[in-house]
Image: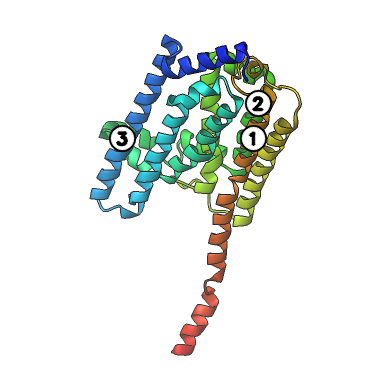
Amino acid sequence: MWDGDHLDAAADVRGALTVPGSLSDIVVKSCVLAVLLVLAGVYTRGWRALRRRGHGTITCEWRLLVYLAGLGLIGLALLSPIDELADAWFSAHMIQHLLLTMVAAPLLLLGNPLPPCLWGVPPRARHALGHALTRHARFRRLLAALTRLPVAWLIYVGVFWVWHLPLLYGAALEHNAVHILEHLTFFASSLIFWWPIVRPAPRLHPRLHPGFEILYLLAATAQNTALGAFLSLQERVVYHHYARATPGIDAVSDQALAGGIMWINGHMYLLPILLLLWRFAKETDGPSPRVSRTAGTAGT
């Protein structure tokens, strides 16, 4: 049975799921929704324009679908009841971060967003934005530096661990502006992390041997698993905000569940690892150029 405090907390959560907490929440959620709708409209417009021009390789239907799915998952994470529950349940907060970093970010990059988005804006804006992506532009050089495998990994892991320090994590839960900054940095570092694996346009680096990419993902798996195991095995509450905000479930149990979700999050890297192994096996099983030339000479 729940005691009176749990019942009051549960009532607070039910109220939060139906009535926005404050005017600032309404403004923030309205801005997020507006940005998502604009990005969806710009991408779709550019995708159609490129498709009419015959660029079939970058306007496959699946790219449009995965890009829109990525935007939809951002909306699910930030605009649905998950966002309200994340303030009360640590496990819900982990689900929110998983959606943003492990699902939405790679889906957006799989949509190869830059070409359609450039063609989805007016010509003057397209030329200005396109100039920033030319070979010697500062922005492109910066993007190339950030998305190198070791640099991207360090940025992603550094952001991940810094925000899970109790002081910063608690500040994000108590202050809306810090919480927005947390989500922005999580998402931006995730885009940087997945860029060298997905490799959307512009192609900033030559493709490395799949072994390096697999090691890159395995290292990310290890650090996710380490933090998940740490949280799951603790017998005390690490983040004190949840000690007084968790309705209907013991705070330590909620923390263990959150650690388990993070553990699962770490194992989600296995899917791209398997895809890389499949691609490597497919490439190595093909006939070598020397064999093909010899066979052609013998035929003549």
> Looking at the image, which residue is at 47% across and 34% down?
139
Q: Position of residue 151 (x, y in %)?
A: 62, 39
Q: The C terminus lies in which quarter of the figure?
A: bottom left
Residue 113 visible in this rendered orientation of the protein? no
Mark 2 lies on residue: 164
Q: Is residue 279 left or right of residue 25?
A: right
Q: Taking 122 as reference, is 293 above or below it? A: below
* Element type at mark 1: helix
Q: Nearer the viewer, mark 1 or mark 2?
A: 2
From the image, which quarter does the N terminus lie in? top right
Specify which label sits upstream in the sequence, 1 or 2: 1
Labels 2 and 3: the sequence-earlier one:
3
Q: Which residue is mark 1?
A: 157
Report the front residue among 34 and 255.
255
Q: Distance of mark 1 from mark 3, alpha carbons?
A: 31 Å
Q: Residue placed farthest to the left in the image?
A: 52
Viewer-closest of 254 and 274: 254
Q: Amino acid at mark 1?
A: Val
Residue topped by disc 3: 42
Q: Are marks 1 and 2 in contact (CB under 8 Å)?
A: no
Question: Is residue 45 shown left or right of residue 85?
Answer: left
286 relative to 42 in the view: left or right: right
